[in-house]
């Protein structure tokens, strides 16, 4: 076999040299570009719309993001889901975090005007039906919830089965305000879309809901799990979440399931809600940096520690005997 000529070897070495120069320049370019990308996603100010029921969770996320990135500032606009969706569709806010999806009117608007947006699932949450710890009732099914929240049952003694006559007094019913996503989700799932009673007292915030239940031993209401979680699955003892059973179309009462992360993850708890990030902001900026953080390991760990279920990280359920 003939050996390569000296001229050919010089040509190969020359090409290899320029290839190394190209690789080195590319590395330097992309390294500089990475630094630029990192800076634009962690430096600056942005506004994020947040559903009031998830305000505590997202405040923790924003605080941690700003701690890690001192040159960033996240302003949170706390409103109901319907108000936030209107702001998003009108272009007043480019990114919102809400429970659930859009209603029919909003869906029609999006289709009519061909509104484009990014959608990311953030977490699974649960709506807890809560009573005062002094109330001996431990569980309710959808039939009982329907009668309580529509005003058909007004006395605690008139509940069904094991609950009948174990507690007395007039039921004080508290509900989330209209336009709040959990107001609509609870109505659809637990009440079969029947209307709330006009005598139900409307709470304008989750803080008010907690105060009303804590201070009235005959009260009942509902709230997202993040608002009654101290850490992970350790819940606030000043209110008592009940075990809930769904009722199918044939009237069969299902299993009574408690408000726990594992049951939310398995979706065996009946009142599971999904949290989403909707964004019309396609630029590389602090908003995209914050959204990436929310979906990252660190952001999802905050979700786990806040009582919700992460959706972008693996969830391992361990049975303890």
Image: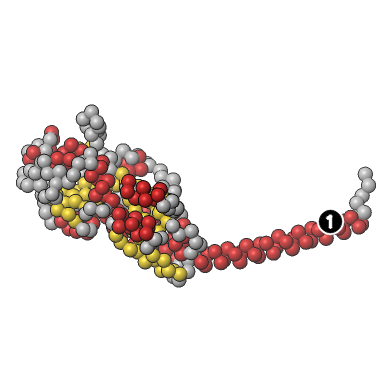
Give the image's coloring scheme.
secondary structure
- The one nearer the camera, 321 or 236, is 236
Q: Residue at x 40, y 49 (%)?
A: 112
Instruction: Please identify the quadrant where the C terminus is shown.
Output: top left
Can you see residue 57? Answer: no
Quadrant position of residue 269: top left
Can you see residue 14? Answer: yes
Q: Residue at x 19, y 56 (%)?
A: 203
Taking the image as shown, residue 308 lies to the left or right of residue 153, namely: right
User: x, y percentage for residue 122?
Assistant: 39, 51
User: x, y percentage for residue 42?
Assistant: 48, 66
> Which residue position holds label 1?
12
Instruction: Please identify the quadrant where the N terminus is shown.
Output: top right
Identify the secondary structure beneath mark 1.
helix
Q: Residue furthest left?
A: 169
Taking the image as shown, residue 117 lies to the left or right of residue 60, namely: right
- The one nearer the camera, 102 or 130, is 102
User: x, y percentage for residue 8?
Assistant: 89, 55
- Decide: is 107 above or below 283: above
- Decide: is 138 above or below 282: above
User: x, y percentage for residue 193?
Assistant: 23, 41
Q: Residue furthest top?
A: 250
């Amino acid at each position: 076999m003939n050996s390569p000529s000296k001229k050919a070897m010089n040509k190969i070495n020359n090409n290899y040299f320029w290839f190394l120069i190209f690789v080195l320049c590319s590395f330097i370019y992309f390294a500089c570009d990475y630094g630029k990308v990192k800076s634009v996603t962690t430096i600056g100010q942005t506004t994020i719309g947040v559903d009031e029921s998830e305000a505590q969770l997202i405040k923790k996320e924003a605080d941690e993001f700003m701690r890690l990135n001192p040159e960033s500032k996240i302003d949170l606009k706390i409103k109901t889901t319907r108000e936030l969706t209107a702001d998003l569709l009108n272009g007043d806010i480019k990114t919102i975090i809400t429970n659930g999806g859009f209603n029919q009117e909003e869906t029609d608007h999006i289709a009519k005007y061909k509104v484009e947006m990014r959608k990311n699932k953030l977490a699974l949450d649960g709506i807890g039906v809560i009573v005062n710890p002094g109330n001996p009732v431990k569980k309710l099914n959808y039939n009982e919830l329907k009668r309580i929240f529509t005003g058909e049952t007004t006395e605690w003694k008139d509940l069904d089965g094991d609950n009948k006559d174990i507690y007395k007094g007039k039921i004080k019913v508290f509900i989330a305000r209209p336009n709040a996503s959990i107001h609509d989700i609870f109505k659809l799932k637990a009440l079969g879309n029947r209307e709330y009673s006009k005598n139900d007292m409307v709470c304008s915030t989750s803080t008010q809901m907690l105060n009303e239940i804590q201070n009235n031993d005959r009260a009942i209401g509902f709230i997202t799990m993040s608002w009654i979680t101290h850490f992970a699955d350790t819940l606030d003892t000043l209110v008592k979440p009940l075990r809930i059973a769904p009722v199918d179309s044939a009237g069969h009462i299902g299993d009574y399931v408690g408000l726990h992360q594992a049951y939310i993850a398995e979706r065996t708890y009946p009142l599971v809600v999904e949290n989403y990030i909707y964004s019309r902001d396609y630029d590389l900026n602090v908003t995209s940096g914050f959204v990436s953080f929310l979906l990252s390991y660190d952001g999802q760990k905050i979700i786990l520690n806040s009582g919700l279920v992460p959706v972008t990280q693996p969830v391992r359920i361990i049975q303890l005997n």
